[in-house]
Image: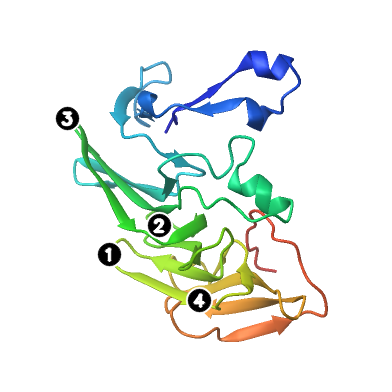
Amino acid sequence: PLMPIQLDFARLLEGASVWQAYAWDPSLGTTYVIFDRNAPMDAAPRIVAGMPLFSWPTVNMYEDGDALVGETVAYTDAGHFLGEAADMALAMQGQAAAEGARSYLHRVVIDGSGIHEETALDAGHLEFPIVAIHGAHHPAMYCAYNPRDGFFWSGVMRFDGETIDSFDFGAGYFCGEPIFASDEGHETRGWLLSEVGSAERGQSFLAIFDAEHVAAVPVAQVELAHHLPIRFHGQWAAD
Protein backbone atom coordinates (compact mmCIF):
# COMPACT_ATOMS: atom_id res chain seq x y z
CA PRO A 1 0.00 0.00 0.00
CA LEU A 2 0.97 3.62 -0.62
CA MET A 3 0.18 5.58 2.52
CA PRO A 4 -1.02 9.22 2.74
CA ILE A 5 2.35 10.76 3.60
CA GLN A 6 3.94 13.67 1.75
CA LEU A 7 7.57 14.79 1.79
CA ASP A 8 8.24 18.53 2.11
CA PHE A 9 11.46 19.05 0.11
CA ALA A 10 11.67 22.68 1.24
CA ARG A 11 12.02 21.56 4.86
CA LEU A 12 14.78 19.16 3.85
CA LEU A 13 16.68 22.02 2.20
CA GLU A 14 16.24 24.06 5.39
CA GLY A 15 18.04 21.34 7.36
CA ALA A 16 15.17 19.26 8.74
CA SER A 17 15.60 15.51 9.07
CA VAL A 18 13.74 13.23 6.69
CA TRP A 19 11.26 12.29 9.42
CA GLN A 20 10.63 15.95 10.30
CA ALA A 21 9.98 16.71 6.63
CA TYR A 22 7.26 14.09 6.22
CA ALA A 23 3.63 15.16 6.77
CA TRP A 24 0.51 13.08 7.27
CA ASP A 25 -2.37 13.93 4.89
CA PRO A 26 -5.39 11.64 5.48
CA SER A 27 -7.31 13.29 2.64
CA LEU A 28 -5.14 11.27 0.23
CA GLY A 29 -6.34 7.92 1.58
CA THR A 30 -4.33 4.73 1.15
CA THR A 31 -3.63 3.39 -2.34
CA TYR A 32 -3.23 -0.33 -2.98
CA VAL A 33 -1.15 -1.19 -6.05
CA ILE A 34 -1.82 -4.76 -7.20
CA PHE A 35 0.34 -6.57 -9.75
CA ASP A 36 -0.77 -9.77 -11.46
CA ARG A 37 2.15 -12.19 -11.12
CA ASN A 38 1.05 -14.01 -14.29
CA ALA A 39 0.81 -10.88 -16.43
CA PRO A 40 3.66 -9.48 -18.59
CA MET A 41 6.21 -7.36 -16.74
CA ASP A 42 5.03 -4.19 -18.50
CA ALA A 43 1.35 -4.76 -17.67
CA ALA A 44 -0.28 -1.90 -15.76
CA PRO A 45 -1.09 -2.66 -12.12
CA ARG A 46 -4.55 -2.40 -10.64
CA ILE A 47 -5.08 0.67 -8.42
CA VAL A 48 -7.53 0.50 -5.51
CA ALA A 49 -8.29 3.33 -3.06
CA GLY A 50 -8.84 2.61 0.64
CA MET A 51 -9.22 4.38 3.97
CA PRO A 52 -6.25 6.38 5.32
CA LEU A 53 -3.95 4.35 7.54
CA PHE A 54 -0.27 4.00 8.35
CA SER A 55 1.47 0.66 8.42
CA TRP A 56 5.02 -0.55 8.59
CA PRO A 57 5.34 -3.86 6.70
CA THR A 58 2.15 -5.29 5.20
CA VAL A 59 2.48 -8.70 6.73
CA ASN A 60 0.07 -11.12 5.19
CA MET A 61 -1.86 -11.00 1.89
CA TYR A 62 -3.48 -14.07 0.39
CA GLU A 63 -6.17 -15.13 -2.05
CA ASP A 64 -9.59 -16.17 -0.77
CA GLY A 65 -11.59 -17.30 -3.78
CA ASP A 66 -11.76 -14.31 -6.12
CA ALA A 67 -10.78 -11.84 -3.39
CA LEU A 68 -7.48 -10.67 -1.94
CA VAL A 69 -7.25 -10.49 1.86
CA GLY A 70 -4.57 -8.34 3.49
CA GLU A 71 -3.76 -8.32 7.20
CA THR A 72 -1.33 -6.03 8.97
CA VAL A 73 -0.69 -3.86 12.02
CA ALA A 74 -2.02 -0.38 11.25
CA TYR A 75 -2.42 3.09 12.78
CA THR A 76 -5.17 5.62 12.09
CA ASP A 77 -2.46 8.27 11.76
CA ALA A 78 1.35 8.50 11.79
CA GLY A 79 1.79 10.66 14.90
CA HIS A 80 3.72 7.93 16.69
CA PHE A 81 6.79 8.59 14.52
CA LEU A 82 6.23 11.72 12.40
CA GLY A 83 6.57 15.28 13.64
CA GLU A 84 8.50 17.17 16.30
CA ALA A 85 6.76 15.46 19.23
CA ALA A 86 6.32 11.95 17.80
CA ASP A 87 5.81 9.22 20.40
CA MET A 88 8.81 7.28 19.11
CA ALA A 89 11.17 10.27 19.28
CA LEU A 90 10.09 11.12 22.83
CA ALA A 91 10.41 7.52 24.00
CA MET A 92 13.93 7.21 22.58
CA GLN A 93 14.91 10.35 24.54
CA GLY A 94 13.59 8.90 27.79
CA GLN A 95 10.51 11.16 27.83
CA ALA A 96 6.90 10.18 28.26
CA ALA A 97 5.20 9.59 24.94
CA ALA A 98 2.13 11.64 24.11
CA GLU A 99 0.06 8.48 23.56
CA GLY A 100 -1.06 9.26 20.04
CA ALA A 101 -2.84 6.77 17.82
CA ARG A 102 -2.50 3.19 19.00
CA SER A 103 -1.94 0.43 16.50
CA TYR A 104 -4.48 -2.28 15.79
CA LEU A 105 -4.86 -5.42 13.70
CA HIS A 106 -6.31 -4.38 10.32
CA ARG A 107 -7.87 -6.51 7.58
CA VAL A 108 -8.70 -5.32 4.05
CA VAL A 109 -10.64 -7.44 1.55
CA ILE A 110 -10.34 -6.46 -2.13
CA ASP A 111 -12.62 -7.98 -4.75
CA GLY A 112 -13.42 -7.24 -8.39
CA SER A 113 -15.22 -4.00 -7.53
CA GLY A 114 -12.56 -2.57 -5.20
CA ILE A 115 -12.47 -2.50 -1.40
CA HIS A 116 -15.10 -4.95 -0.20
CA GLU A 117 -14.35 -4.60 3.51
CA GLU A 118 -11.92 -2.94 5.95
CA THR A 119 -12.08 -4.20 9.51
CA ALA A 120 -10.32 -3.60 12.83
CA LEU A 121 -9.78 -7.10 14.24
CA ASP A 122 -8.11 -6.17 17.55
CA ALA A 123 -7.57 -2.84 19.30
CA GLY A 124 -4.52 -3.81 21.34
CA HIS A 125 -1.27 -1.90 20.82
CA LEU A 126 0.73 -4.10 18.42
CA GLU A 127 3.96 -3.94 16.40
CA PHE A 128 6.67 -6.00 14.67
CA PRO A 129 4.27 -8.38 12.87
CA ILE A 130 5.81 -11.41 11.17
CA VAL A 131 4.71 -14.58 9.38
CA ALA A 132 6.54 -17.86 8.97
CA ILE A 133 8.57 -17.68 5.75
CA HIS A 134 8.86 -21.45 5.36
CA GLY A 135 5.51 -22.05 3.64
CA ALA A 136 3.34 -20.50 0.97
CA HIS A 137 0.08 -19.92 2.82
CA HIS A 138 1.16 -18.04 5.97
CA PRO A 139 -1.68 -19.30 8.16
CA ALA A 140 -0.52 -17.42 11.27
CA MET A 141 0.81 -13.95 12.17
CA TYR A 142 2.85 -13.13 15.27
CA CYS A 143 3.57 -9.71 16.80
CA ALA A 144 4.65 -7.85 19.92
CA TYR A 145 1.67 -6.85 22.03
CA ASN A 146 0.76 -4.32 24.74
CA PRO A 147 -2.70 -4.53 26.38
CA ARG A 148 -2.19 -1.41 28.54
CA ASP A 149 -1.17 2.24 28.15
CA GLY A 150 2.42 2.94 27.16
CA PHE A 151 4.48 3.02 24.00
CA PHE A 152 6.47 -0.22 24.34
CA TRP A 153 5.27 -3.84 24.22
CA SER A 154 5.09 -6.28 27.12
CA GLY A 155 3.88 -9.47 25.46
CA VAL A 156 3.42 -11.46 22.27
CA MET A 157 0.37 -12.33 20.17
CA ARG A 158 -0.60 -14.99 17.62
CA PHE A 159 -3.39 -14.51 15.08
CA ASP A 160 -4.44 -17.33 12.73
CA GLY A 161 -7.08 -15.47 10.72
CA GLU A 162 -9.86 -16.36 13.15
CA THR A 163 -8.61 -16.44 16.74
CA ILE A 164 -6.17 -14.36 18.78
CA ASP A 165 -3.92 -15.82 21.49
CA SER A 166 -1.63 -13.62 23.56
CA PHE A 167 0.70 -13.70 26.55
CA ASP A 168 1.56 -10.62 28.61
CA PHE A 169 4.59 -10.49 30.93
CA GLY A 170 3.13 -7.42 32.68
CA ALA A 171 4.11 -3.83 33.35
CA GLY A 172 7.85 -3.22 33.47
CA TYR A 173 8.71 -5.81 30.82
CA PHE A 174 9.64 -4.91 27.25
CA CYS A 175 9.38 -7.39 24.38
CA GLY A 176 11.13 -7.18 21.05
CA GLU A 177 10.01 -8.57 17.71
CA PRO A 178 8.97 -12.22 18.00
CA ILE A 179 10.82 -14.66 15.74
CA PHE A 180 9.27 -17.89 14.46
CA ALA A 181 11.52 -20.96 14.56
CA SER A 182 9.91 -23.71 12.51
CA ASP A 183 9.93 -27.35 13.58
CA GLU A 184 11.49 -28.96 10.50
CA GLY A 185 9.92 -26.51 8.05
CA HIS A 186 6.35 -26.78 9.36
CA GLU A 187 4.21 -23.67 8.74
CA THR A 188 2.73 -23.39 12.24
CA ARG A 189 4.47 -25.97 14.46
CA GLY A 190 7.60 -24.67 16.14
CA TRP A 191 8.68 -22.03 18.63
CA LEU A 192 8.29 -18.30 19.02
CA LEU A 193 11.33 -16.43 20.36
CA SER A 194 11.29 -12.96 21.90
CA GLU A 195 13.97 -10.96 23.71
CA VAL A 196 12.41 -9.52 26.86
CA GLY A 197 13.85 -6.81 29.12
CA SER A 198 13.01 -6.37 32.79
CA ALA A 199 13.07 -2.76 34.01
CA GLU A 200 13.24 -3.84 37.65
CA ARG A 201 16.24 -6.15 37.22
CA GLY A 202 17.96 -4.25 34.41
CA GLN A 203 18.50 -7.58 32.66
CA SER A 204 17.06 -9.39 29.65
CA PHE A 205 16.08 -12.94 28.83
CA LEU A 206 15.07 -14.91 25.76
CA ALA A 207 11.49 -16.19 26.08
CA ILE A 208 10.64 -19.34 24.09
CA PHE A 209 6.96 -20.14 23.44
CA ASP A 210 5.17 -23.03 21.81
CA ALA A 211 4.21 -21.20 18.60
CA GLU A 212 0.81 -22.92 18.43
CA HIS A 213 -0.05 -22.12 22.08
CA VAL A 214 1.25 -18.60 22.70
CA ALA A 215 -1.23 -17.90 25.51
CA ALA A 216 0.50 -20.52 27.69
CA VAL A 217 3.55 -19.58 29.74
CA PRO A 218 6.90 -19.78 27.92
CA VAL A 219 8.24 -23.30 27.65
CA ALA A 220 11.73 -21.98 28.49
CA GLN A 221 13.63 -18.79 29.36
CA VAL A 222 17.31 -18.15 28.71
CA GLU A 223 18.48 -15.68 31.35
CA LEU A 224 21.17 -13.12 30.54
CA ALA A 225 23.41 -11.31 33.00
CA HIS A 226 22.91 -7.97 31.23
CA HIS A 227 20.27 -6.04 29.31
CA LEU A 228 19.70 -5.97 25.54
CA PRO A 229 18.37 -2.94 23.66
CA ILE A 230 15.07 -3.28 21.83
CA ARG A 231 16.02 -4.24 18.28
CA PHE A 232 14.24 -4.31 14.94
CA HIS A 233 13.78 -7.47 12.91
CA GLY A 234 15.49 -10.81 12.78
CA GLN A 235 15.11 -14.32 11.45
CA TRP A 236 15.75 -17.86 12.63
CA ALA A 237 18.19 -20.08 10.79
CA ALA A 238 18.61 -23.70 11.81
CA ASP A 239 22.24 -24.77 12.34
Q: Are marks 4 and 1 in contact (CB under 8 Å)?
A: no
Q: Earlier in the sequence, mark 3 or mark 4?
A: 3
Query: SS class of the residue under badge 3?
Result: loop
Q: Residue flagged by tag 2: what amino acid is it?
A: His
**Which residue is at 42% across, 16% downward?**
42
Q: Assess disc 2: are there few (<14), some (14-19) or many (≥20) residues with their C-alpha within 10 Å of its C-alpha.
A: some
Q: Nearer the viewer, mark 4 or mark 1?
A: 4
Examine the image and state in which quarter residue 174 appears. Answer: bottom right
Q: Residue 225: which quarter of the image?
A: bottom right
Which residue is under mark 4? 168
Report the Cα–Cα distance between label 2 and label 4: 24 Å
Which badge, 4 or 1, comes first in the chain's sequence? 1
Residue drawn where x is 45% and y is 44% of the image:
58
Residue farthest toward the right in the current orientation of the protein = 225
Left or right side of 36 for 212: right
Identified by mark 3, the residue type is Ser
Image location of residue 28, percent across then percent down: 38, 24
Which label belongs to residue 162?
1
Q: Nearer the viewer, residue 13 or 37?
A: 13
- Inter-mark Cα distance, 3 to 1: 25 Å
Residue 236 drawn above or below residue 21: below
Identify the residue under disc 2.
138
- Kindly identify the amino acid type of the residue bearing the numbered disc 4: Asp
Distance of label 1 from label 2 (alpha carbons): 13 Å
Q: Inspect the image, locate mark 1, and give the three-letter code of the amino acid beneath it.
A: Glu
Q: Is residue 176 left or right of residue 30?
A: right
